[in-house]
Image (cartoon, rainbow, N blue to C red):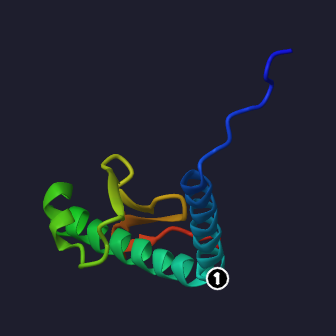
Amino acid sequence: MANSKRPRASRSSRVGLWLFLLILIALAATAWVYREPVRGYANVGTTYSARVACSCRFVAGRSLEDCKKDKLAGMELITLVDNVKAKSVTARFPLITDATATYREGYGCVMEKWEG
């Protein structure tokens, strides 16, 4: 009869697996606890960025690439996309939120309706 025993994982690989699972659970718990503050900061950051970039682009007449230089420290994850035809700029924070500001004659750049 052939030996049907499976090779056992080494102690260090089991410890590594448990450590990985523990870190994963800790990250998930941290994300759960801080979800509202992160979402709040993301909403404020995208709204601010869209409004400032729209004014820079369609009031001051600068290129979007030049306007990206005006982003504040800490806003590196926010991306900006302009729509020249609609005269709008959309700012996005990955996987969380986005905001759009549109230039309106006589009003400047105004934020589009936001559903939060």
- Count neighbours of disc 1 (C-alpha within 10 A) and say few if under 14, some if 14 to 19, many if 20 or more: few
* In the image, residue 2 above or below residue 8: above
Q: Is residue 40 visible?
A: yes
98 or 110: which is nearer to us? 98
Give the side of residue 90 with respect to residue 75, left or right. right
Residue at the spot x=24%, y=79% of the render?
A: 73
Query: Residue 74, percent across and down?
Result: 30, 77
Residue 106 visible to the viewer: no
Q: Quadrant of the C terminus?
A: bottom right
Classify residue 55 as left or right of residue 109. left
Q: Residue at x 61, y 74 (%)?
A: 26
Please tell me in which quadrant of the rendered image residue 79 appears. Answer: bottom left
Which residue occupies the foreground of this view, 13 or 109?
Answer: 13
Between 76 and 32, the residue placed more toward the observer is: 32
Q: Which residue is mark 1?
A: 33
Image: 108 above or below 97: below
Q: Residue at x 37, y 58 (%)?
A: 88
Q: Is residue 65 left or right of residue 109?
A: left
Residue 70 in picture, x, y percent from top left: 18, 73
Q: Position of residue 22 (x, y in %)?
A: 62, 68
Image quadrant holding the N terminus, namely top right
